[in-house]
Amino acid sequence: MSANHDAIWSSCLKVIKDNLPLQAYKTWFEPIVPVKLDNFVLTIQVPSHFFYEWLEEHYITLLKKVIKKEIGAEGQLEYSIVMENSANNSNPYTVKLPASNKKAVKNAPVNMPINISDNPIKNPFIIPGLKKVNVDSNLNPSYSFENFVEGDCNRLARSAGYAVANKPGGTAFNPLLIYGGVGLGKTHLAHAIGIGVKNQSPNKTVLYVSSEKFAHQFIDAVRNGTTNDFIHFYQMIDVLIIDDVQFFSGKEKTQDVFFHIFNHLHQNGKQIILTSDKPPVEMQGMEQRLLSRFKWGLSADLSTPDLETRIAIMEKKMYGNGIELPREVVEYLAYSINTNIREMEGAMTSLLAQASLNKKAITLELAKQMIDKFVKNTAREVSIDYIQKVVCDYFDLPIEMLKSKTRKREVVQARQISMYFSKKMTKSSLASIGAHCGGKDHATVLHACRTVMNLSETDKQFRVYLEDLEKKLTIQ
Ligand code: ADP
Ligand code: MG
């Protein structure tokens, strides 16, 4: 391609100008600077995150059209957001965001009587016969395995999912039921499996559907007298992913129709993947015959990720979106929000938006303020890990030393102080504090707490250490 980004962008602008009121054009398009054109991807620089969101919300259709017109069918758009650092402008940084890519991971056309998703039959007696229809997989390409960080919290579910993706219907994990609390990655993993299947076996028809949508389609089908088409449609799917099946609780008719679809698919070696916010034993209002089928395959849980995994998840999101945040901010977010990954990501997004709108640098201070304002119901007890990190940073010691057996004076002191604060600020037992500090027993922890208290009464410098640290540890 010979045209450069400036030329391409000015041709785009001509079309945009013709299609918009002048004021809108001036406000939203004049400030944009084209940055580069690389492999059919045009990168444009916008002044803030807010600006980007506005464009995505109001002008994305127009933008996409002109991009395709000027660059061709493969044309894509990426944003780069330059945020000014309020302290000095020498350190701006860039956020790279791909334009929203809702394009589904495509299924090949399949023979079906009807595609109920967008064209319910009005009159059940006019069955049009089999015809090729496109089934939208509803898969979100960014919820892939590559973007899913592995940790102890998800190892079983992830590897079972991986096996299923490689051999849908051909493993013992059928159905595969992924369960776990809100925001822990069930939906993400379910999509990842679907995407994995499409990568390995593009000819398989994969369908992701929320249980709400399934239930509503069923109600519509009953109302329109097209129940058979509904059932037939679902029976043609090779890999059926139903998200949040707990929603079926108490809905007898929906459970009934799902039971028939389930049986048909299972008997024909088709793969079923389900997610739920609780394990089958705790699902109330679900028919026994359905529950027993859920147990045929594998139920794998997603639990709360540990600190390292949370940090890794944040880093992956940042990397994927071209965002850079100071390390201490990432750690602070990961330390403070420990039960829900969606909230952690939400905090990161709010922080970026805040910084961009107010042209502030992203600092630990800003992160602390933001967390208070934007994140509700976060469990925020300081953890032993956090205490150890703050103490080690303060004394400039590597955290491994604290957990080692070394008897060096400064290490012993830092270790004892960590134990003291862990006892004071967390609900952990002496034994578990000891276990976190390199496998010490509860008597050692008790001794440490006493030593620290004695020293704080007799040693002035030591008292200053404790006060400094206490301030750092108290999250305002
Ligand atoms: P759930 O369906 O369990 O409520 P989601 O799948 O919607 O949770 O996940 C919430 C957010 O957390 C998503 O943006 C998802 O990408 C992210 N997430 C969860 N677990 C992981 C993980 N292990 N690696 C990367 N991102 C994750
Ligand atoms: Mg979900």
Image (tube, rainbow, N blue to C red):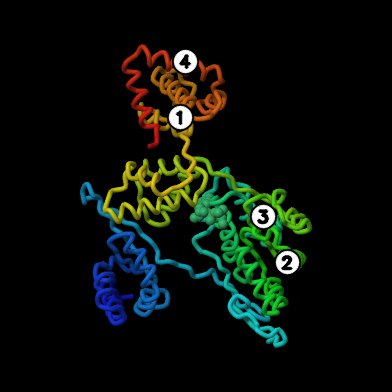
The answer to the question of whether label 1 and label 3 lie on touching residues, with beta carbons closer than 8 A, is no
Please tell me which residue is depicted at 54% across the width and 48% down the height of the picture: 150
Indicate yes or no: mark 2 CB to ligand 2 under 8 Å: no
Quadrant in the picture for the C terminus: top left
Sequence order check, earlier mark of 1 and 3: 3
In the image: residue 82, left or right of residue 75: left
Which residue type carries mark 2?
Lys
Which residue type carries mark 4?
Arg
The answer to the question of whether label 3 and label 2 lie on touching residues, with beta carbons closer than 8 A, is no
Which residue type carries mark 3?
Leu
Residue position marked by numbered label 3 in the rendering: 177
Q: Position of residue 415 (x, y in %)?
A: 45, 23
Residue position marked by numbered label 1 in the rendering: 400
Categorize mark 3 by other alpha carbons within 10 Å: few (<14), some (14-19), many (20+): many
Residue position marked by numbered label 4 in the rendering: 450
User: Can residue 147 be seen in the rendering of this structure?
Assistant: no
Vertical side of 261 occupied by 449: above or below: above
Please tell me which residue is depicted at 29% across the width and 64% down the height of the picture: 45
Sequence order check, earlier mark of 3 and 2: 3
Q: Secondary structure at mark 3?
A: strand
Dividing the image into four equal quarters, which quarter contains ligand 2? bottom right
Categorize mark 4 by other alpha carbons within 10 Å: few (<14), some (14-19), many (20+): some
In the picture as drawn, the residue positioned furthest to the top comes out as 458
Dot in front, 2 or 1: 2
Q: Position of residue 388 (x, y in %)?
A: 44, 30
Sequence order check, earlier mark of 1 and 4: 1
Please tell me which residue is depicted at 47% across the width and 15% down the height of the picture: 450
Residue 1 image-quadrant placement: bottom left
Which residue type carries mark 1?
Glu
Sequence order check, earlier mark of 2 and 1: 2
Q: Position of residue 276 (x, y in %)?
A: 64, 54
